[in-house]
Amino acid sequence: MKLWLLRHAPVMLGPGLCYGSSDVPAHAALTREAAMAVSPLLPPGTPVWVSGLLRAQQLAAALQAERSDLGAARIDTRLNEMDFGVWELQRWDAVPPEAFDAWMADFAHHRFGGVESTQMLLYRVAAALGELRPATSTDVLWITHAGVIRAVRHILDSGGVHIREAAEWPKDAPEPGGWVTVEL
């Protein structure tokens, strides 16, 4: 089966802000453009899973407007972006270097911002993937975030859910509104 990983459209915030788990809206016109671009590519009846965050749900609604055959989206908070705690809605360049150093020193388990670690993100994404593998024979679409897409790639590329260091973390993710597919 193919898993489609669709990233929400650009958000309505200025550049350079950390917005991980913050529930911020996406740009409406760019959300419609993203839905129109991916909709003709999806097989009929593709199940849709969507993050619990507004910007992903906006894209699910726009996609539903294009393709009613896809059915209602299943909201799954395991597809939410990583929670950066105290750094949410702060400028990335205002985060003290020591905070990044601590994260890089223990990339798997350090809770950057005090809430969620990379390993915790991997565990919840792996749990969602686990529901797909045994029960699904059709393509599935996840409308999600860059961190979740990187987590999926890490799990599939490494063959496991654990990570030791930042060098193992996938560097690439689709731009907002973009997608990638992976074979499960």
Image (tube, helix red, strand yellow):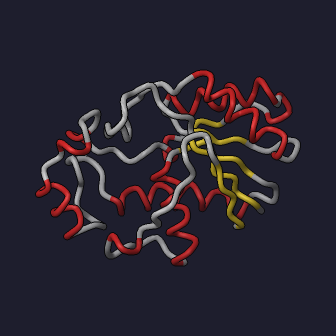
* 80 or 182, nearer to the observer: 182
Rendering coords of residue 43 (x, y %): 86, 47
Query: What residue do we see at 23% from left, 66% from top?
Result: 104
The quadrant in which the C terminus is found is: bottom right
Rendering coords of residue 14 (x, y %): 36, 29
Q: Is residue 118 left or right of residue 128?
A: left
The quadrant in which the N terminus is found is: bottom right
Query: What residue do we see at 47% from left, 30% from top?
Result: 11
Q: Is residue 32 above or below residue 122?
A: above
Residue 70 figure quarter: top right
* 15 or 31, nearer to the observer: 15
Q: Is residue 120 left or right of residue 131?
A: left
Q: Is residue 105 left or right of residue 43?
A: left
Query: What residue do we see at 84% from left, 40% from top?
Result: 40
Residue 3 figure quarter: bottom right
Q: Is residue 131 above or below residue 170?
A: above
Rendering coords of residue 58 (x, y %): 59, 26
Query: What residue do we see at 56% from left, 75% from top?
Result: 157
Rendering coords of residue 6 (x, y %): 63, 46
Task: Give the total number of marks visible in the rendering.
Answer: 0
Residue 21 figure quarter: top left
